[in-house]
Amino acid sequence: MSDLLPRGFRFAGIHCGIKQDAKREDLALVVSDVPASAAGVYTKNLICAAPVDWDRQRTPGAAIRAVVVNSGNANACTGQQGAEDNREIAQITADACGTSVENVLVMSTGIIGEYLPMECLRTGIPTAAGQLVSDSDSLLAVARGLMTTDTVHKLACRSVATPQGEIRIAGVAKGSGMIAPDMATMLGLVMTDAALESEVAQQLLAEICDRTFNCITVDGHTSTNDTVLFLANGQCQHPVMEIGETGAFAAALEEVCGDLARAIAADGEGATHLVTIDVGGCRSIADARQIAKTIAQSPLVKTAITGADPNWGRIVSAAGYSGISFDPKQLDVSLNGTPIYGQGVPIAFDASLLSESMRNHHETKIGLRFGEGQSQTRFWTCDLTADYVRINADYHT
Amino acid sequence: MSDLLPRGFRFAGIHCGIKQDAKREDLALVVSDVPASAAGVYTKNLICAAPVDWDRQRTPGAAIRAVVVNSGNANACTGQQGAEDNREIAQITADACGTSVENVLVMSTGIIGEYLPMECLRTGIPTAAGQLVSDSDSLLAVARGLMTTDTVHKLACRSVATPQGEIRIAGVAKGSGMIAPDMATMLGLVMTDAALESEVAQQLLAEICDRTFNCITVDGHTSTNDTVLFLANGQCQHPVMEIGETGAFAAALEEVCGDLARAIAADGEGATHLVTIDVGGCRSIADARQIAKTIAQSPLVKTAITGADPNWGRIVSAAGYSGISFDPKQLDVSLNGTPIYGQGVPIAFDASLLSESMRNHHETKIGLRFGEGQSQTRFWTCDLTADYVRINADYHT
């Protein structure tokens, strides 16, 4: 994987003492050898964490050198103290990496409403800075350093070959619970050695987030800390790209974001199924997304999938309360490719065979086609299991 | 209880064969001895059942004589056949009760997308009509005849003493899953011997539903069949009431609807806690309701209550993504009366004592006060347990 790593980035992920388990990384540091263009997309939650406020003021930005991330504590709802702690983290990182505080971005994730254990960070950040290297093991440690209730790390890489040279993209993300679309869900950090002006980076990131990270939900609860950062440091040979020239690169970037988004839905807390919802034949993409999101957030649809039950009534009735108008007589629904509802009436199908298919596949595919227009979207969620309840009823403040 | 029954109504609830368990009523019949003013409030789901279409065309109405209800089959998503079956049910009821088909209202609840077992109803309705009496046992049988996944029947009565005579109100309802606000959630039937024009009845019902049945959620999934019907047959001695003259009567009617709504939330599928959410200090009641509903629908808030965890971060962050703007620095939050968040920062409290209080009380009370205005609302929901998942993952189509 090392020959896929974007050039000019170094990585470190360590345990600094925020998480109780000393084997689990809770601090990640990424440094660009040269100033990178940086873009950010953030939670739309009115209650947002100190690092979100900090980063929002500094993106798009032209000279970012470092991103520091802690997991285990969100530094959210912590008022003035939280803002001061965040600034100190940026300052320690700047000092340890030989840059200015203004060139450091910060992300935090974990419990809401507790002050950060600053002693851990005061020791941990210089330690991490001393371990920075450009290899895949360190990037993996960064991916693990973002995790909270995640059961697997999320990492995706792509390489784009162009006549002017190869461009590389790597992304890491975390997310499993408190995941809802309509924002830059979760934490994500995407790095490339492409050369992009920060405004171009921002525009690309915002567009791609709308089709990837903003198309997932686990539980419909929008976090206070959701952040996706995108760094482009220009260390490949390909010249600077303007909007309109980013074709193959933008496609690869969308693949990286799509892989990470899908991985978050698949790793939803307690999930046994990834659910992919394709909605087509709508008047607009916004309509299609609203319908897909309503289905994805229905606990009745989610529990039907847990139980491998081809219960189309729950799917159709969720579409019906999405707030989008449509002609029910033109609605077709399929489940794992089997037509189950056509032109507004039930279609006969072998329920036990379809249930078997749902039970045996980790991914359940729901398809809806309306007769309203040509717009379509794809959305990801997971099923709702008794384990989701246990994880969240037992997780204590 | 018999001296609380509204005069001029007769009741019957029987098992006709729709439910598998022969001990469970699945058919309920209510007849008014004289034509009653009738009002209705219905689901806003675009996909709605045949009986909803039927009733919607006939309310407000001045001469309703009978309401027939079946449980176990929703007659939803059944197309033209469903509409024909519904008309036949109304016709059989009219014949059995000596009235015209236009004076019969119908409600159905249960599984979506299966055709009604009409043989059961062709036999059952005349049988029920032969058992109509005006006593509390029969009203209880009606309440039981509405139940699906409900674990208890829902029944509420009030009597209003006025100088012109006593007015009586009785209501029955069902609902446990597929319950979400912003419509007339579930099935409900409220009867009174008051004299009201049907337009007055409709206005009263709509206003009161907005503060009762539309202020509950179990799982955020709006059903295809939700209906609340209200019959007023004028068999008390009190003269006809106009809007503006309904004071004590309207208050009692709201108590009946509120009791039933609260009972539905308390009996939410798998629930171990009723959750009452009071939101105040908002710019409008709509704002307060949107915030309360967002909190009530968050699976993270619900599972925290399951686990008796005073996790205010989940409550505050849910308010933050409700879409309503507010100043976080003026937000106060309490849990079971204990202040836990004040003016935008955490308040020190004894977490184990508060957790104990949550564990030991069936009702959990969440209070939020904003600094935006004077409007307030009360909202009810329940917690989310592993049993909710089991009930809905195992319930098969």
Image: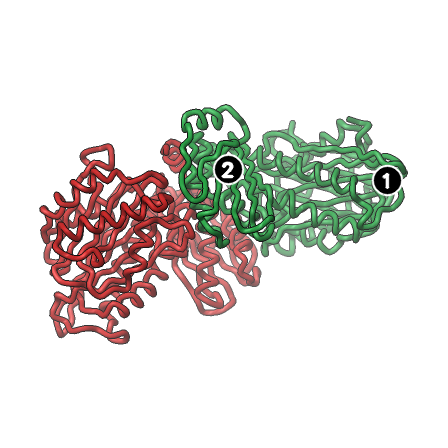
Chain colours: A red, B green
| Quadrant of the image occupied by residue A42 | bottom left
In the rendered structure, which amino acid carries the disc numbered 2? Tyr
Write the residue at 56% across / 47% down: B281
Q: Quick check: can you spot residue B226? A: yes
For label 1, the SS is strand
Mark 2 / mark 1, whichever is N-terminal:
1
* Residue nearer the viewer, A98 or B192: A98
Q: Quick check: can you spot residue B102? A: no
Question: Image quadrant for the N terminus of chain B?
Answer: top right
Q: Where is residue B129? Give x, y as percent.
A: 79, 36
Q: Residues within 10 Å of mark 1 (few under 14, many from 20)?
A: some
Write the residue at 38% across / 48% down: A223
Q: Where is residue B230? Give x, y as percent.
A: 75, 44
Name the residue beneath numbered marker 2: B395
Give the total number of marks visible in the rendering.
Answer: 2
In this image, A62 relative to A115: left or right?
left
In the rendered structure, which amino acid carries the disc numbered 1? Asp
| Quadrant of the image occupied by residue B168 | top right
Label 2 lies in what chain? B
